[in-house]
Each structure stands twice: as C-alpha cells, then as structure tokens.
Amino acid sequence: MDVRGFPTRCGSPVSDPRAKVQDASVVAQLRAAGAVPIGKTVTTEFAYVTAGPTRNPWHLGHTPGGSSSGSAAAVASGLVPIALGTQTGGSMIRPAAFCGVVGFKPSYGTVSREGMHLGSESLDVIGWFGRSVEHAHAVARVLLPARSESPRHLDGAHVFWLDANPGHVLQPDAAAALSSAAALITEHTHLVRRTKEFAGHAELLNAHATLMHYEFARSLQATVMADDGLLSGPLLKAVRRGWAVDGDTYVAARRLQAKAQLSWEASFGDADFVLTSSAVGTAPAGLQYTGDSAFNKGWSVLGWPCIHLPTTFAANGLPLGVLLVARPYADLDLLTWAGQIHAVIDQRGNAKCTPIQQPKAVS
C-alpha cells in the first residue's frame, strides 16, 4: 500500500524504488483521523509465497506467516499498536495467529483498495493488526462504512462451533486451544451447534485456487514482461498456472463464489458467528515455508469478516488462538462480540511467555 514519502516495493527489487507522492486511501483516512504512519513493513514477494527477511518475534527460527507477516511481527514485537495488511488467502489471519496478535479481515468490498497493488480482484481485502480488539475496533470505525452500532451482549449470542476443516487435522495444542475457548464461551452464550463438517469447503478451496491464479497472472503480466531475472521461481510458476486457467473455469469459479457468499443461513442457520481455528497449529520452524492457509482460504472466497483472537501458548512457547467469523457486513457486530469474547477466553495472563525481541513500544 502506498504511503506518501515511501516507495512501495511489494517485497521485490523489480518494483519502482521511487517514493510515492500520495497515500493509499486507507492511509489517508487513518492519517486524517490522527494516526501517524512511521514506516513500511515487509511483505512476501508480491504477497505470494516467497518469504522476506521477517522472523517470528516469539522464536526467531520460526516463520511469522504469509504476506502480511511484517505487519503482524511489528505489532507483536511492540513496535506499533496497529499495522495494515492484506489478505488474498490467509495473509492476515495466519500471521496474526503465528505472531500472537489480533488480526481483523473485514467484509470484502467494504474498505477502499485505492493505492494498493492489487493481486486478485475478487479476493484481495485490506485488513489490520492490533495489540487488542479495542485497537482493531478503533481502526474499523475509521475505515468501515459508518453505521449505528447496536448493543451486542454476549449472553444472547448464538455460536456455531466448527472444530475442523475437511482434509486438515489440527495439531493437538491447537485443538486443545479451540476446545478450551469453546468451553469458556459456552458458559456465557448459547453454543448452538458443533460440527466437523463445513459443506462445500472443498469446492471453496478449488475456487480459491482458480480465482487467485487467474487474477494473479493478469495483475503481474507487465511485471513479468519487464523481469530481468529478479522474480522468484515460485512466483513465475504461479503466473504460468494462472495463464493456463481457461475462461470457462474462471467464470464457473466466480459464479460459485457469488452463490456461496449468500449461504450463511444454509451453512450456519441463525448463528451470530462461527468459532473455529485460525491455523492448523503454531508457526512452523524455518523461514522459507510460511505455513498452511487452508483454514483461511474458504473465508477469503466467501468474503465474510474474520478476527483472530490470541488466547494461549503451545508447549513450545509459540502463540495459539481462535478465529471468529460473522455473516457479511456484520463487521462492527463481530468486533463488539470479539471484545467481550476475548475477555472471557484470553488465558495468556498466567503465562510467562514474551517475544524474544521487545523494543520500546510506540504510543
């Protein structure tokens, strides 16, 4: 995203090194509300899979996650209270989970993307990280459509507990964190249903692959044509895969997406939000693999609002948490519930874990 006075490098030396002369819309909105941008964070190469130099502040030998990992790590290490990011598949929620911070992905289409390098027209969303739900809520009041916020009391909420996704098994620590959160929430809400099935999840993953590759290839075509051997092999492979997707397949994926986006009641009935996992487990060891985004891609295709809440730590000291998902355009309701839920399920107060790097916080 463009910030006046800084270049937008997209994690690649191929990009334009010149400083931008104006802010992206979201940056301008936040600046007008009193925020002070102090710098840019690192992304993976064009927000795809080739990792940058960012490391996980909880364990420097572990990945901080996907493309918005620089922003998540900046918040986790105490450098800033909030930071912007983007999500195409799992690039907000997964770094939030791996770095142990609040990560919010709003409903698709509610936040302006003007001044952002667009990788996928039908999937890309600008979101943000915060030290707390209150931080995330404050940003939402600036960037989301202004609405009157109705009182939302946790004791009247209906929750759908989704404790797995087809074909992916949670690591024991992650499963325990989700079960613990569900048990604590049950004491304060109407936990209406629990299931391991999410109808149509496999189709959503297939649609994501089609949409992302098709659109990614076209957004990067000019960059690829100007490449002087500086683009990575995985990125070039993804572009070739995108150009191999035929028009009929792409249109079918868009139609499936449009239909699925209206499927909340069919999938989750009268639930106010879904409780599930943000990731398969903790941040994997190593810095080249940014982790599995399978638990996030379906929500990205649906375009529904999501928030990661850090709750505890695994036996290895790395952060764990849970994901809340709400029906489309219920973003402010979700943030209100999330604040109440986090107060109930956050068990980090008794832990003695702190990030390895703790620079002085910026107030």
Image (cartoon, rainbow, N blue to C red):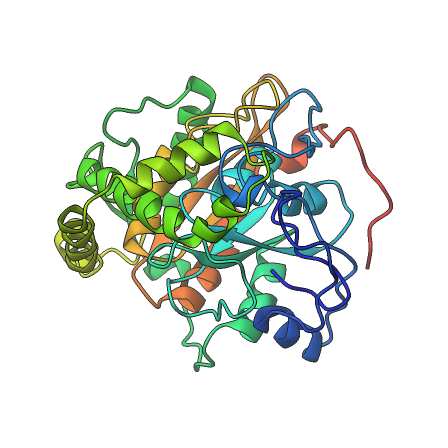
Residue 109 sits above or below residue 208 on the image: below
Judge left or right: residue 175 versus residue 214.
right
Q: Kindly indicate the quadrant of the structure image that contains residue 239.
A: top left
**Residue 318 on image: x %, y %:** 61, 25
Residue at image position (43%, 25%) is 176
Residue 234 sits above or below residue 201 on the image: above
Judge left or right: residue 172 versus residue 273.
right
Q: Nearer the viewer, residue 239 or 297?
A: 239
Q: Kindly indicate the quadrant of the structure image that contains residue 63.
A: top right
Q: Residue farthest to the right?
A: 360
**Residue 152 on image: x %, y %:** 40, 67
The image quadrant where one finds the C terminus is bottom right
Residue at image position (41%, 70%) is 110
Residue at image position (23%, 42%) is 245
**Residue 33 on image: x %, y %:** 68, 78
Residue 332 in view in this figure: yes
Residue 116 sits above or below residue 232 on the image: below
Residue at image position (54%, 47%) is 226
